[in-house]
Image (spheres, rainbow, N blue to C red):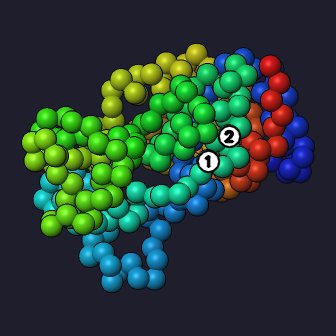
Amino acid sequence: MSDKSFDENVAELQRLIDSSSNIVFFGGAGVSTESGIPDFRSVDGLYNQKWRYPPEQIISRSFFDANPAEFFRFYREKLLIKGIKPNAAHLKLAELEKAGKVHAVITQNIDGLHQAAGSKNIFELHGSTLRNFCMNCRAPYDADFIAASADSPDGIPHCTKCGGIVKPDVVLYEESLDEACMEGAVRAIRNADMLIIGGTSLSVYPAAGLINYYSGNKLVLINKSVTANELAARLSIHDSIGKVLGAIKVTK
């Protein structure tokens, strides 16, 4: 852990960014929680009264197939969050991309906030709540359609064309990550001259293993708690990702 002050850490990060031309950002849940999106694993006081199963079980593919009504009840309340806006981290990354500094954003989040902030080249490892498809005919639906299914007789979103179940385009437990997305993320990291990892403890695999494809010497870790691979990092900052990136000045 760095014993430098916040200003000293930001100044060093600024120097690294200014001297780089192909930056890749890899972000986890901590990037979204700063926008007010709760970690779905967090347990509120009424949790055991509302949910009879642990969250990891509810958002597994086997549970989805066996009990879609309970899955969608949890999904709509815990994962389909409305009225959330990008925070300083999302906005700064989009600004850095526009300036030609950041070439790719790789995210484990499914909320679409990087797109809302203006980032273009995004690899969504775990999919997105914004995309939904009929499992039978592949007809597309938006998030509002899934939200409205709470009022349907069985609480399950059914395709208006064929009646099939509409599944969110998110990667559930027991499902594999999208191969093309993973390949694109690996390619971006291999070509990066700087890799910034923020808002993740690097404990969720296979996504966390992506760091192994980076061979440069500008690895930066920004997370409130201790992160794996800190010994390999050029700079490690234990602070808010929004506060840190928000302090960066963008120059072309």
**Callout 1: 10 Å neighbours few (<14), some, many (20+)?**
many
The residue at the point 33 percent across, 36 percent down is 177
Mark closest to the chain's N terminus, 2 or 1: 1
Residue 35 picture quarter: bottom right
Percent coordinates x, y for residue 217 in the rendering: 70, 24
Rendered view: 196 above or below 193: below
Q: Dot 1 corresponds to which residue?
A: 86
Rendered view: 139 above or below 156: above
Compare residues 142 and 57 and report the one nearer the observer.
142
Name the element at disc 1: loop
Percent coordinates x, y for residue 73 in the rendering: 28, 66
The residue at the point 27 percent across, 37 percent down is 140
Position of the C terminus by quadrant: top right
Residue type (three-letter) at the residue carrying disc 1: Pro
Q: Is residue 33 visible?
A: no
Percent coordinates x, y for residue 193 in the rendering: 67, 19
Along the horizontal axis of the image, is 179 left or right of 154? right
The furthest residue to the left: 162
Compare residues 87 and 21 and report the one nearer the observer.
87
Name the element at disc 2: helix
The residue at the point 27 percent across, 65 percent down is 150
Q: Is residue 210 visible?
A: yes
Along the horizontal axis of the image, is 95 left or right of 43? right
**Callout 2: 10 Å neighbours few (<14), some, many (20+)?**
many
The residue at the point 59 percent across, 51 percent down is 85
Compare residues 223 and 156 and report the one nearer the observer.
156
Q: Dot 2 corresponds to which residue?
A: 91
Residue type (three-letter) at the residue carrying disc 2: Leu
Along the horizontal axis of the image, is 10 left or right of 109? right
Label pair 2/1, CB-CB below 8 angstroms: yes
Cα distance in 3D space between marks 2 and 1: 7 Å
